[in-house]
Amino acid sequence: MRRAAEVRGPPLGDGPDCPLAVGAVFYKPGVRTALHALVGAEFTVIVQGAMNVALTPFGIPTLTGPFVLASWLFLLPRPHFGQD
């Protein structure tokens, strides 16, 4: 039985760009936004690890999937942030 090819990507947590998208581009800067962006960065790292574990047996690299997923999820509450 052949094993799936081992996929090696960047180390976990290497370059989570979600904070940049959330904290500097789409939201008004502030303390609340900074905290939201930091949580987004941590979430991106967790998603990267989960996607690596889930997709490696199939030989599929995660590429930018974790960034896209985390950015979408952290941009959803945008209408509720208001103009503090």
Image: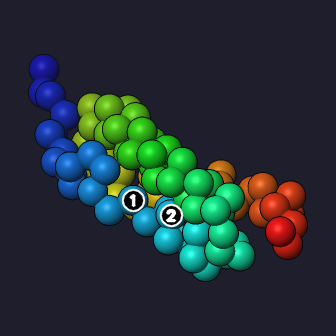
- Answer with left or right where residue 74 lies relative to residue 79: left
Q: Residue at coordinates 59% horizontally, 54% vertically from top-left?
A: 35
Given the current orientation, which residue lies at the most extreme top position?
A: 1
Quadrant of the rendered image containing residue 29: bottom right
Q: Position of residue 47 (x, y in %)?
A: 45, 42
Count up the numbered dots: 2
**Local secondary structure at mark 1:** loop
Q: Position of residue 6 (x, y in %)?
A: 14, 40
Q: Is residue 82 visible?
A: yes
Label 1 CA crowd tier, 10 Å (few <14, some 14–19, many 20+): many
Identify the disc placed on residue 19. Answer: 2
Quadrant of the rendered image containing residue 83: bottom right
Label 2 CA crowd tier, 10 Å (few <14, some 14–19, many 20+): many
What's the amino acid at mark 1? Pro
Quote the CA–CA distance across marks 1 and 2. Answer: 7 Å
What's the amino acid at mark 2? Pro
The answer to whether 61 is drawn above or below residue 55 in the figure is below
Q: Nearer the viewer, residue 57 or 69?
A: 69
- Answer with left or right where residue 46 lies relative to residue 18: left
- Answer with left or right where residue 39 lies relative to residue 31: left
Q: Which residue is mark 1?
A: 16
Mark 1 touches mark 2? (CB < 8 Å): yes
